[in-house]
Amino acid sequence: MSGRLYTLCEGKRDKFFLARLLRERLGTETRLYDMKDLDELIRNQRFSGVAIVDCGGWNEMLKQASKRARDITVNPSELPSATLIIIGDEDHVSVFNFANHYLRNEIERLKSTSKFLEYEIENEMVMVKNLRRAVNTKVVVLTIPNNLESQISNSIKNHNQGFREYGDKRVINLYCEELYGCDEERMMKEDREVIPPLFDTEWSKNIVKHVN
């Protein structure tokens, strides 16, 4: 991996989960950002470790990843080289949808780039190529089976049978209210019963592997 590493996720819950996962499994220093920080982050701000960006939803995440991958590849003299990792819920995100819809649209939006930008898909990776400058930008698209909400809810239900009758959102709200005063950020950072088991899932291990 060369250059910087940007990890784009759907929302705050994902951001806090990823920060803890990378800290506990890799000892990785993370910097947490919102969408409003993205321009400054990509253009100017220096950071160490991994930048995790909350994009405020899967659609905006895919749009931003496509636009930023295009711009970084087109403007290597202005924008630091980077690898992008997209982490989204499987019920909305796929590598093929990202590449063949979102990325293709962003490339074609700038007519001048469509002549010398191309991309290739290989498993979970999309390589964006600048044919004029021999510059490549790697985008890795990783998914959480179904969605993170259901993963957390199932872990809570496995820990407490009394929650089994409720839907995912209700389960998380009840658990968080009971133990963390409705502070979900605190729950994601401190919980020792239902969050850590998720770090041993295959999808979490795959995220760790790609970041590492």
Image: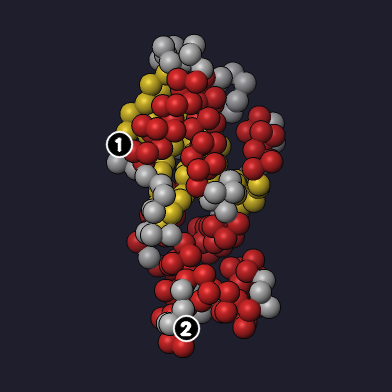
Comparing marks 2 and 1, which lies closer to the viewer?
A: 2
In the rendered view, would you say 188 is above or below 87?
below
Q: Image check: 94 left or right of 38?
A: left
Instruction: State the image coordinates of residue 150 (x, y, percent, origin top left).
Output: 44, 67
Residue type, mark 2 in image: Phe
User: How packed is label 2: few (under 14 Cα within 10 Å), some, or many (20 or more)?
Assistant: some
Q: Residue at label 1?
A: 122
Secondary structure under badge 2?
helix
Q: Residue at x 48, y 40 (%)?
A: 62
Instruction: State the image coordinates of residue 115 (x, y, percent, origin top left).
Output: 41, 12
What whole-number distance in Å separates the C-alpha atoms at marks 2 and 1? Answer: 41 Å
In the rendered view, would you say 29 is above or below 162?
above
Q: Image check: 173 left or right of 44?
A: left
Q: Can you see residue 52?
A: no
Q: Residue furthest bottom?
A: 162
Nearest the viewer among 149 and 65 is 149
Instruction: State the image coordinates of residue 9 (x, y, percent, origin top left).
Output: 53, 49
Q: Residue at x 57, y 54 (%)?
A: 11
User: How packed is label 1: few (under 14 Cα within 10 Å), some, or many (20 or more)?
Assistant: few
Secondary structure under badge 1?
strand
Question: Which of the two labelled residues, at mark 2 and mark 1, occupies the earlier sequence position?
Answer: 1
Q: Can you see residue 185?
A: yes
Q: Residue at x 48, y 65 (%)?
A: 149
Mark seen at residue 31: none
Nearest the viewer among 162 and 138 is 162
Displayed quadrant of residue 120: top left
In the rendered view, would you say 75 is above or below 56?
above
Q: Residue at x 60, y 25 (%)?
A: 79
Q: Residue at label 2?
A: 163
In the rendered view, would you say 169 is above or below 22?
below
Instruction: Tell me the quadrant of the picture where the N terminus can be found.
Output: top left
Nearest the viewer among 120 and 163 is 163
